[in-house]
Image: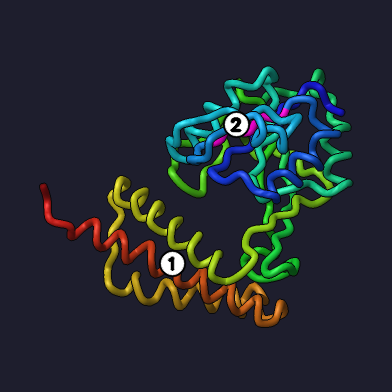
Amino acid sequence: MNNNISLCIITDNLDERLKQTVAACSAHFREILIGYNGTADLSPDCMEGYKPARLIQQEWEGYSMTKNKLAEKASNDWICSLDADERPDTLLFEEIGRINIQDADGRNVYAFSRLSFFEGRPMQHGAWGRDTVIRLYNKRKVQWGQDPVHEQLGPYTSDRLIRLRGKLYHYTADNAATFTKKNRHYALLSAGKYFIRGKKSPLYKRWLSPLFTFIKEYLFQLGFLDGIAGFKIAWINARYTYWKYHFLHQKINAPEG
């Protein structure tokens, strides 16, 4: 067990999968914080199922700010940040446990290789085939940026990036409907980010970008090797690309006042 790393998870849903994540991580992290921004009443009976994690009610302020504020409540400077639908495998747990935080440079960040599951199957190709995420960092040196979606940690330089062995299992969607709903929500957030940055949404962008997304993921990134699941992911991601420019176009052309 690593006593010098705090595990932080933000969520708006207290479910069985989160319980399984907490149970799997409890033998490896002495401190587990769950930042909850949902509407359920956190009764003692409810919290019992997530022990030894500490549930903290938070206001939702976007992914980055909410994650940063939860990290500030941790007793350790070193943070392992997971999503509610993520879980390290045995080798990754071992790699995290071997880090000597006392000797680690505070500007180092640690990257995990992520293996995403769709409809119960691991996806080896397409957009998810080479997925690497940075999830272990020192909160005094590195923080989540201010983007409302697809948030990134920084600042750091490439020589400070250390890749750990093992896999971070990502149970992103049990079915296409769930994934479509999630992507539509992210598209709306991305449109807001683009609008603030002054990006445009010309007609060719709204129609050609989704086509390119599908061709890139399904053909160039070999998504077809994942069978019908690879087709579904590429198609839904293409729809996400369309939606974010469609929503941006609506924002740009919305009447003032």
Query: What is the quadrant of residue 201 in the picture?
Result: bottom left
Along the viewing direction, whichever of 217 and 231 lies nearer the viewer: 231
- Amino acid on which disc 2 is placed: Ser
The residue to which callout 1 is attached is 241
Disc 2 and disc 1: Cα gap in Å?
40 Å
Residue 246 position by quadrant: bottom left
Q: Find the magenta span and give its range.
A: 32-36
Q: Residue 50, position in %: x, y?
A: 71, 36
- SS type, badge 2: loop
Q: Relative to 10, is 105 on the left or the right?
A: right
Q: Which mark is residue 203?
A: none
**Where does the image place residue 19, in percent across and percent down from the top left?**
72, 44
Residue 108 shows in this picture: no
Which residue is at 47% across, 48% downward?
149
Specify whether residue 227 is in view: yes
Is residue 92 a member of the stretch shown in magenta? no
Mark 2 or mark 1, which is nearer to you?
Answer: 2
What amino acid type is highlighted by mark number 1? Answer: Thr
Which numbered disc covers residue 43? Answer: 2
- Numbered-mark total: 2
Q: Which residue is drawn at 26% across and 63% down?
A: 249
Residue at 43%, 67% (x, y): give it: 241
Q: Residues within 10 Å of mark 1 (few under 14, many from 20)?
A: many
Q: In which quarter of the image is the N terminus?
A: top right
User: Mark 2: few, some, or many residues within 10 Å (few <14, many ≥20)?
Assistant: few
- On screen, 175 above or below 50? below
* Side of 130 relative to 3 (left or right): left
Report the side of 247 relative to 239 (left or right). Answer: left
Q: Disc 1 on helix, strand or loop?
A: helix
